[in-house]
Amino acid sequence: MVQIQPRQTVADVVVIGSGAGGGTVTRVLAGMGINVTLIEAGPMVNPARDYKEHMWPYQVPHRGAGTGLMYGGREEYAFGYFLAPNGYWNIEGEPYTSAPGTEFRWFRSRILGGRTNHYGRISLRFADYDFKPYSTDGLGDDWPITYEDISPYYDKAEEFIGVTGTKEGIRSAPDGVFQKPAAPRVHERLVKQSCDKLGIPCIPSRMAIITKNHNGRAACHYCGQCGRGCITASNYSSSQVDIFPAMKTGRVTIMNDAMARELVTGADGRVTAVSYIDKATRTEKQIRCRTVVVAASACETARLLLNSKSAASPNGVANSSGVVGRYLTDSVGYGLTGYVPALEGMPKYDSDGFGGMHVYIPWWEWAKKNKDFPRGYHVEIGGGFGMPGVGSFHRQCRQHEGYGAALKQNIQSEYGCYIGLSGRGEMVPNAHSFCDIDPVVVDRFGIPVLRFHWRWSEYEHLQVKHMHNTFAQIIETLGGRVAGLRNPEREGSGISAGGSIIHELGTARMGADPKTSALNKYCQAHDAKNLFVADAAPFVSNPDKNPTLTICALAWRTAEYLAEEMRKGNV
Amino acid sequence: MSDQSRRDLLRGAAATALVGSLDPLAAQHVHETVASQKAAGTYQPKVFTTAEWKTVQVLCELIVPGAASGNAAEFIDTIASANPALAAAWTGGIAWLNARANGSFSNAAPAAQTQLLNQIAFRKNDSPELAPGIGFFDLARRMTVDAYYTSKAGIAEIGYQGNKGMSEFKVPEEAVAYVMRRSPFA
């Protein structure tokens, strides 16, 4: 699939990265008759070969335990052996560093489709007030666009990728173009009852999963394994939903196993070429371009911009403002597990359904005054009779110990009796959280690596306390008891480790003022008119909504703007 | 069914999905065919001696009755063969057991076996002398439980009913009624 471009060729559009943003831009532009060259740092994906959907654990001798590193307390697979080949916390030969005394976890993908191969498919619109955080509470900055600007693109994105949901009229969770949701599972009905009693909304989840046949994709068959990648493309992944169909136009050239190294700029500051490492030969090559769309994921995008230095751009391309790498945020994560006696002995049923929750809790206190923390969070709900896997019953082993019939009895009686509540909240950008280029360390290609600086502020710690109290109340109101913390990657207080929720963003933010932002309101670089960004780097804030749907909507808007600017001859 | 033919089948299903119309039966067929795939043949341990192998089998069966039907010993040997530290933990643990069972845990009387396990199966018995045994038993218990409950036999016993396609997601009303009756919302 690798197609080496002859050096004299000038590509109309080079897109760097094939996740939600790169995939959307590629599809939209190809659909408008524009040729796109897509650079991906990893291999192609072949869902039929690479996804392990429907496999039973006993179909591999190690059952998913690999070489058993988990038994020594070490990770082997980021999210288990059966999950989609989506990426890694650590990539051999491609390190990143953290400043002394800080820790940041960076999950990177190296495959066509990027993290959309595995992501949670949760698809939440940002609310009107999410675009005006400064106007709302005096913290952070407002976006250069409003909800009204992006709303039509939410419509398009939801209609195209397919999102479940119901019209609820809740300000924190704007309604959209929805497919029919799935019925709530038993434990979800219990959580809903508890929320009703507490005055907390609990509504059908909004997932990028289709429940009717759509654009040649088969409706969901409710096997619960979205995270493994869906062979029938019944959920959204950019490879299957954007890129493969776009390839049929004949206008998409994919250069896989090509690691972008630098954007080459001309005397006028415009990008003239993309320099990349051809991984197969470990040689550096260049592709000349008329325009470039960087969609490498927020931090990888920042790294590329910062590494693209020239006499005209000594701080990196598109960075005369100095904001590239700054304003780094992740979602605030906190989770509690609850044990629910009411679920003991329930008649077993196939609770697989979506790979994820069927109901969720949107933020409900947006109008409340005198809260002790700004912003809010949503709550994701877990539970049910999951497919047993390695580690599924370690809790019972640890808690009840013993062996023989008694151990089996404990495992049997507690199966399906746990629920999980996971908060995903908004972090306010702070001066201590950013990434820059490590002055010493390079990766195996000789490319300087990112160095992370990270600190949660008191705002986030206070928010986590609110989460804890709320979750404990929900669990206890339904007759359960709190059984423990849920986030696997966390700091001592239980707050998620920075980066571990994998909603890192904000590192090339958009804004009206070129002195305080890298990109304009169309995600076009203030300093280089033919450079665009189409991932979560342009986000001005990180609302309590998973970023993917907004990445798709913004990327769609950017692609249309780019096409129009090309037509006008402006780029 | 070979891995190759399974892949071909899945590839066929995916190709169908891409061109437009997926026969719902095709997805179901994939599920069923995959489910029927089964490994065959007699297992030759890669890590353990004949005597150790017997001990692993006896220990697994004591931890989870029926472990043999879940190929627990085979699972442990497979993983240990790829992980020298884990292999050492197992051979060392077996030696520890043997040293406290007149040289052979597997040949010891059932009462002697359970007497020893009753000591090392609980952290509350921790002592300098028992610590290695307690540590090893914790590992052995987790691996045996993992092996059994990821096997066909264990999955059937626990009552997991999923990993199959369905055209509509349905929740049985009797399950809802059962739980609501037992909840504070009754």
Image: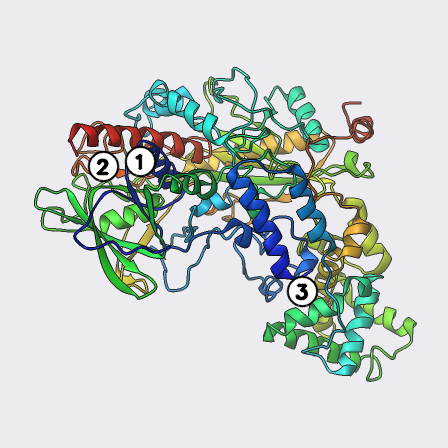
Q: Secondary structure at mark 1?
A: loop
**Given contact means CB atoms under 8 Å apart, are the residues at marks 1 and 2 in contact?**
yes
- Mark 1 and mark 2, same subunit? yes
Tell whether A204 sits left or right of B172: left
The subunit carrying tag 3 is A
Residue to which mark 1 is pinned: A538
Q: Which residue is mark 2?
A: A518
> Dot 1 surroundings within 10 Å: few (below 14), some, or many (20 or more)?
many
Q: Residue at x 31, y 34 (%)?
A: A29
Q: Position of residue A454 (x, y in %)?
A: 37, 47
- Callout 2, which amino acid? Ala
Disc 3 marks which residue?
A: A61
Question: Looking at the image, which residue sits at the far left?
Answer: A267
Establish if A496 lies above or below B137. above
Image position, residue A1 (x, y; %): 38, 55
Label 1 vs label 3, nearer the camera:
3
Question: Furthest-bottom residue in view?
Answer: B103
